[in-house]
Amino acid sequence: MDGVHDLGGKLGFGPIEVADEGSPFHGAWEGRMMGIARAISRPPDWNIDKFRHSRELEAPVLYLTRPYYDQWYKAYACMLVGSGVVTLDELASGKSDGSTVTGMASPMSADEVPEAKRHGAGFDRPYDGEPRFSVGEAVLTRNVSPVGHTRLPAYARGRSGVITATHGAHVLPDAAAHGEPRAEPLYTVRFRLSDLFPERQGSLDQVHLDLWQSYLDADR
Amino acid sequence: MKPKPYDSSQAADLHPKIHAHVPSEPALRVKALETLLVEKGLLDSAAVDAWVEAYSDEIGPKLGARVVARAWTDDAFRARLLADGAAAIGELGIGGWALNHLKVVANTEAVHNLVVCTLCSCYPHGLLGIPPAWYKLEAYRSRAVRDPRGVLAEFGVTIGDEVRVDVWDSTAELRYLVVPQRPKGSEALDAAGLAKLVTRNSMIGAERDLLLGAGGA
């Protein structure tokens, strides 16, 4: 979606606050939110793309001003309410109204954390077909403006690049965020900085993005 | 009742309702959420404790520094690491959150690598821990792909005209680790000593020249 989250190349955000904060969390609640996200019992249809799209649909002024882990809270609140697992009143009060949901796995116990933290999720999937592009091929990103979730940033739309790596097929975020699990070939595409941003003419610098097949056309 | 299918487009309508209903203070929101989920049998607070403890102490840049030091001292490992990052860190017993598709890129005399996530905040959590605040904020996310040399200058890093900057925007589930160059004069150090020189920022690419005797990760 053309949202405020799509920040690459946007101007006006000022200098970077480079100071090292020294600790991973700036308040106990941030750690609690991270831990809730890792340990919560989740409906079977949740996935990372639903989380990301839920996060990026926060009102722009809030997206840009609320603390980072508050965005996580909001995304989980949306997913919980949207799945019918909790109500708005329950979220507000912190107290259950007594209704129960079935078909949910029991929550992760502390004993299961050591094993869980050693294993991440994989997003590669079997794919019935041949990838359309190969390494070294010139591609043109599609100049699209999807209403739903996508991982093709605005700054890299309608631009020429070169395939530098193939990664088999990965879950397509544009489909998964909307409840359709589907995989597509994934590629790393190299762009010249000067092809992305006109004021960088003459620069030798490069930007690399990982892009799905349906974001790309052959550049002939 | 079973959970309903969730299409994340619903969030457009849910956000304003949630914002209007819940306490405005983030700490209170999160406390209410945790209490509610525990009462509903959907969360065990002891598991939250265990995750917080792991990411406060055990899981952090020290793990990445160990990988970098090994790459500096073992050419065969370095080759495997650059070819298949996830498999190579698995040899060291490292795996976890956001590491299944790890891609490792190495700085050279001619190339400097910089990692960003312009669309959200993707980061190799299981290897570098919780990302620094600046990595998650708008200034870095917007500027790293457009003005990487200006961004690096704000971190005190000057990149010569002869060096190319390669920016990696984490748009899919690949996660990136930068192997900085081994500092000159570090020949006498073993892998454990070398790991102490490796800073978190250098493994994101926000630092280039590591210093002997510097406090590392």
Image: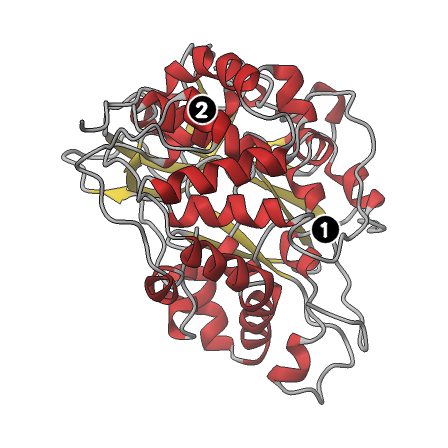
Residue B72, by quadrant, is bottom right
> Which label is found at residue A86?
none
Q: Nearer the viewer, residue B169 or A121?
A: A121
Q: At 52% across and 43% down in the image, what residue appears?
A: A33
Is the C-beta separation of discs 2 and 1 under 8 Å?
A: no
SS at circle 2: helix
- In the picture as drawn, the residue positioned furthest to the left comes out as A128
Looking at the rendered structure, the kind of residue marked 1 is Ala
> Which label is found at residue B206?
1
Q: At 18% across and 27% down in the image, what residue appears?
A: B1
Across and down, in percent, residue B68 comes to 58, 69
Q: Nearer the viewer, mark 2 or mark 1?
A: 2
- In the picture as drawn, the residue positioned furthest to the bottom comes out as B188
Looking at the rendered structure, the kind of residue marked 2 is Ser
* Image position of B54 (left or right of B165): left
Q: Quadrant of the C terminus of chain B?
A: bottom right
Residue B65, by quadrant, is bottom right
Across and down, in percent, residue A84 comes to 29, 23
Q: At 74% across and 27% down in the image, what residue appears?
A: A200
Q: In this view, does B67 lie above or below A2?
A: below
Q: Which of A24 and A199 is in front in this view?
A: A24
SS at circle 1: loop
**Chosen colour scheme:** secondary structure
Q: Nearer the viewer, residue A212 or B197?
A: B197
Residue A144 visible (yes or no): no
Across and down, in percent, residue A207 comes to 59, 36
- To which residue does mark 2 refer? A54
Q: Using a 10 Å C-alpha cutoff, classify the residue at mark 2 as few (fewer than 14 neighbours), some (14 to 19) or many (20 or more).
A: many
Q: At 50% across and 25% down in the image, what residue appears?
A: A92
Q: Which of A179 and A208 is in front in this view?
A: A179
Chain letter of mark 2 equals A
Residue A72 visible (yes or no): yes
